[in-house]
Every structure is written in structure tokens, then in C-alpha cells.
Amino acid sequence: MSKDSDAFVSKKLASMSLEEKVGQCLTFTWRGTMLTPSGIEQITRLHCGGLCLEPYALETCKNLYWGNSQLDQNFKKPKDYFTISNTYFAGKTFGISITPEDYTDKLNQLQKIAMNRPSGIPLHLTIDFEGDFKNDYMSGGIRQFPGPMGMAAIGDTKLTYKIGLTIAKQLSAMGVTQMYSPVCDVNINPKNPEIGVRSFSDDPETCARHVVALLKGFQDGNIAATAKHFPGRGDSVTDAHDVLEVIKASKQRMQEVELYPFKAAIDAGVKAIMTGHSIYPAYDDKFPTTLSEKILTGLLRNELGFKGVIVSDAIGMAAILKKWPLPQACAMAIKAGVDTILLKADDESRSQCFFGVKQAVEKGEISENRLNEAVTRLLKMKYEQGLF
């Protein structure tokens, strides 16, 4: 950190309560285009650090994620437990389209609410804009481009950079601050049901070249890029939304293939990296990456030297939820090295997750140093983007 950001972040961290620090490590979801009590209270009462944006969908609360309820039926509520408002829309169709101007106004309102919190900490506002089926904002003149596989097929990294810069200029003008892209997965398995055309290629070097070009375009346009899904889900034959897969690649193969684009992204200064929900026995035969201290702290931090923000993939996916209840998984992930937990279809369980992490800190399962380390990285990223 520079001296200015170091001093600012240290002072801000020292003034924060435990509740504010815990909330800062949670990225909830804001769907649709309405500011509801539910959407506001996740900022004001649960102190969330950021919101994942889904502008096209109705806000929902009773959401079964691939058939699973997100609530932990065995969760033991502490004395200070509370729930926030829930919004139950009955609509079965996606929400209304909204113009960039109207959406900008809504995002500014959300930031104003966040900045008026006692902590005065702005939100990181994140979005999936990976190309193909994951362009989460498609209304009112926002320009669309080929997905990663299309960019690689064109074969011009200068054009890939320009695409990244153009996307960033459009979305940062609306108030978006972070992108869950570029996809670094080297898609070497043709039976992969999840990654598809979101991958640039089945060739590590091609992936790396376009990953670097795209992330530089994003970050030159003041959007924090997020390389994913570490350490690589290109050799998967299942979808992590449904099952937890074991990817039995050797360390040598992973160094040459899966990790190659991530190393290039780190060298290029990528701001954030998102975890993938798979087990890699070469590094940890027990826990998936999102819950693995050996992979997140050992491999990503210590071996590869990544100093930025580690983001979990959506923690409520079945790869995690079928074995670990959501509040426990959130605490395990932060302990392992995740800095911010992404909760996407987990509306009713937001309070459980918040208190699950808070209790883990109070019991010493997560050290105060680990929590402070995570919050420091998040505050630094926001400071360097000028969000304060």
C-alpha cells in the first residue's frame, strides 16, 4: 500500500466494530430495480461490504438454489440474533428492463445509503459480464461483444483489450466497481457442462494472453477484474452448482495448464481472484478450494504471491451446501483465506451467515488477525479505486 492508503485504511479499520468487519466480508445480492426494505437492511443492519447486481430479475426471498433451501435448520441463534426484512415477490417472470440512466440513479442511492452508515464505507458493486449467457446487464444501449471463446477465435489481443476497456467505461459510468471476469479456466475437457464458451480456449497460452488483455482493459477503465475459478475448472465433467467434483490432476499438470493463466493474471496485477468449488487432491484431498487453507493460503498466497482480494464463488452452490451448512461454510471459507463471501440465492439465510461468521470470530475459530487482514484488503481495493 502507498503511505496515504496505508494510513487511511489503518485508521478506518481501527474505528470499525466487529459487526462492521464481519459485514464487510459479505457480498450479498441486489436483484431487480426496486429499493426494498430487504435490499436496504442488508446494507444498514448487516453492514455488507458489497452487492452482486442482477438488474434483470425480480427480487426474491424464498429461493431454492438447485432444489436446496439455504437455511440451516440446526443453526443455534446467539442472544443478539436478529433477522432483516424479507421481500416476497410472487412473480414468476424476470423483472422489467431498466435504462442505464435509471440504473445509475439506483446505484447512487445504494452508495449514499452505504456512505451514511456509521462506518462511512462504500460498497463494491459487482456484476457477471463474462460474455454469452452471463451478460447480466443488457438494456438501454449497453454494447454487447463476443464471449471469451469468440475473442480468442478473432485472435487479436489488442481487440480483446479494447473490448474490456469499453465494457468497463460503460459499466463504471453506471456505478459498477468490480467484474467477476475474466474466466481463466483452460477448457480442456469437451464434456465440461459449466464453463463452455466462457473459457477463451483449451490452450493455456492462448487463455493467458487474452486473460491479461481483458483484465487490463477492465482495470484501465476503473473496474476491479476478478480472475476465476481458481485454480481452474476447465477439466471438470460436472457443474459445481449441482455436485462437488474431484479433479485429479497432478501438480505438474496443474502448473503447466490450470495455473498458467492465473499466474499471468497475477503478474499483470489482477485485483481479485475467485475460488472454484472443486477438490484438487494434488494440493488438498479433503476440502474444496473455497474451504482449503492449503490452496488459498499455501498455493495462492505463499507460492504464487497473490496479494489482492480473494472472492468465493457463490457459497450456496450444491458443491458446498450438500456437505457444509451455509453459516459454517462462510466461517470456514474466511478462516481458509477468503476475504469476501459471495451469497447469491441466499436471501433468507443472510442473518444466519452474518452471525455464523461473527460467532466464529468470538469463539476464536477465526482469529481477529485473519478478519482484519481480509477487511484491510477490501478497504484497500476500494480506496485505490477512489470509492471513498
Image (cartoon, helix red, strand yellow):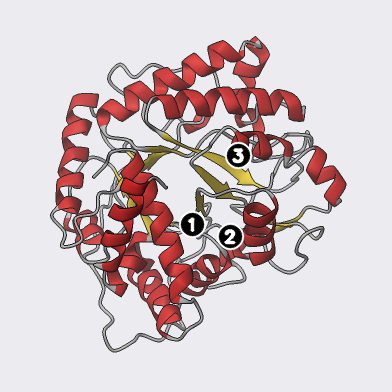
Q: Which amino acid does label 3 sit on?
A: Ile
Identified at 52% across, 54% down, the residue is 312
Which mark, by number, is residue 318?
Answer: 2
Residue 92 lies in quadrant: top left
Regarding residue 170, the answer to whether it shows in the image is yes
Q: Is tag 1's residue or tag 2's residue first in the polypeptide sequence?
A: 1
In the image: residue 30, left or right of residue 319: left
Please determine whether, in this image, residue 195 is positioned above or below residue 356.
Answer: above
In the image: residue 113, left or right of residue 241: left
Q: Position of residue 245 (x, y in %)?
A: 72, 56
The reply to whether dot 1 and dot 2 touch (C-beta < 8 Å) is yes
Q: What residue type is labelled 1?
A: Tyr
Please determine whether, in this image, residue 237 is positioned above or below residue 171.
Answer: below
Identified at 43% across, 54% down, the residue is 377
Viewer-nearest of discs 1 and 3: 3
Q: Which amino acid does label 2 sit on?
A: Ala
The reply to whether dot 3 and dot 2 touch (C-beta < 8 Å) is no
Quadrant in which the C terminus appears: top left
In the image: residue 71, left or right of residue 206: left
Q: Position of residue 221 (x, y in %)?
A: 38, 25
Along the viewing direction, whichever of 340 and 198 lies nearer the viewer:
340
Q: Name the residue under label 3.
A: 266
Please determine whether, in this image, residue 6 is positioned above or below residue 140.
Answer: below
Cα separation, mark 3 vs mark 2, equals: 29 Å
Tell me the SS state at disc 1: loop
Cα separation, mark 1 vs mark 2, equals: 8 Å
Q: Name the residue under label 1.
A: 65
Q: Where is residue 317 in the image (x, y as percent from the top left)?
A: 55, 57
Residue at the far bottom: name it. Answer: 79
Cα separation, mark 1 vs mark 3, equals: 32 Å
Q: Is tag 1's residue or tag 3's residue first in the polypeptide sequence?
A: 1
